[in-house]
């Protein structure tokens, strides 16, 4: 069964960023009492710590009309490999109630994915994701793979609050996919960082 969904996603992105270093002014440091040559002090590290390179978040999505209802939860964790490149993973759970066909059914779908995101410009990013979902169809449960590519735009609305639009396409287009061939996966939402 194919269906067309464009979901409004409310996202909670937990971002850890920045670090503050403080140094004592040079004139407040006492000279050593020993006259022997002292080893030069190593400069403080400017490389972000592991904790500062990790970010957490996720999304809550929903779709509804007439006799159809869907809600999904998708937590994620990611690591900034470089300032513009990050890799991460997601888990996904989806509850679906569909009373549009001859048979009414409730479904519990779940899956996982790994992704990579590259920031092309401050507001524009490219996204690639390999995912698998286990769908509970009326005819039985099936696992379906997805290879999603695309990108998005994000803009800071207020400190630690971003608005975003993301569009992805599935390159695998599995025969059992519940989505129409060539149908984009569109997400619109707001992210909040802490």
Image: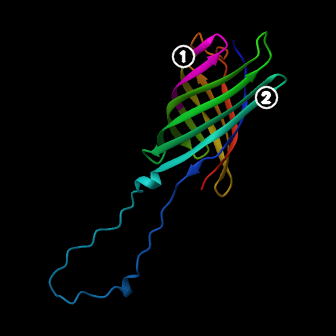
In what element is the residue under mark 2?
Answer: strand
In the orientation shown, which residue stands out farthest toward the left?
A: 36
Spatial CA span between label 1 and label 2: 27 Å
Q: Position of residue 122 (x, y in %)?
A: 58, 47
59 magenta-colored: no
Q: Is 54 placed left or right of 61 in the picture?
A: left
Q: Which residues are magenta?
A: 128-141
Label 2: few (<14), some (14–19) or many (≥20) C-alpha neighbours in 10 Å: some
Percent across and percent down for residue 92 are 58, 32
Prevailing SS of the magenta stretch: strand
Which numbered tag is attached to residue 4?
A: none
Name the residue tied to disc 2.
64
- Mark 1 is surrounded, within 10 Å at the Cα level, by few (under 14), some (14 to 19) or many (20 or more) other residues, namely some
What residue is shown at x 27% (from left), y 87% (from top)? 31
Q: Residue furthest right?
A: 66
> Please, is residue 6 above or below residue 59 in the view?
above
Answer left or right for 75 relative to 24. right
Residue closest to the eye, 33 or 70: 70
- In this view, the mark in front (1 or 2): 2
Residue 46 in the figure: left or right of residue 20: left
Q: In x, y percent, where is residue 120?
A: 54, 40
| CB under 8 Å between discs 1 and 2 | no
Q: From the image, which quarter does the N terminus lie in? A: top right
Q: Secondary structure at mark 1?
A: loop
Q: Disc 1 or 2, which lies upstream in sequence?
A: 2
Q: Is residue 22 above or below residue 160?
A: below
Residue holding disc 1: 172
Asked if residue 53 lies left or right of residue 70, the reply is: left
Q: Residue at x 47, y 42 (%)?
A: 85
Q: Nearer the viewer, residue 194 or 24?
A: 194
User: Where's residue 82, x and y in %?
Assistant: 43, 46
Q: How is the image coloured?
A: rainbow
């Amino acid at each position: 069964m194919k269906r067309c969904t464009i979901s409004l996603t409310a996202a909670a992105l937990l971002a850890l960023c920045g670090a503050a270093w403080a140094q004592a002014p040079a004139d407040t440091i006492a000279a050593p009492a020993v006259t022997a040559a002292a080893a030069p002090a190593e400069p403080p590290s400017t490389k972000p710590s592991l904790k500062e390179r990790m970010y957490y978040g996720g999304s809550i999505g929903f779709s509804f009309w007439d006799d159809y209802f869907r809600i999904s939860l998708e937590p994620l964790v990611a690591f900034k490999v470089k300032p513009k490149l990050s890799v991460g993973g997601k888990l996904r759970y989806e509850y679906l109630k569909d009373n549009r066909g001859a048979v009414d059914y409730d479904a519990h779908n779940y899956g996982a994915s790994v992704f990579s995101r590259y920031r092309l410009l401050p507001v524009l990013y490219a996204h690639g994701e390999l995912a698998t979902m286990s769908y509970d169809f009326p005819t039985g449960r099936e696992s379906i793979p997805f290879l999603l590519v695309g990108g998005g735009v994000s803009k800071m609305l207020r400190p630690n609050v971003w608005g975003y639009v993301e569009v992805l396409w599935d390159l695998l287009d599995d025969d059992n996919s519940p989505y129409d061939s060539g149908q984009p996966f569109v997400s619109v939402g707001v992210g909040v960082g802490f």
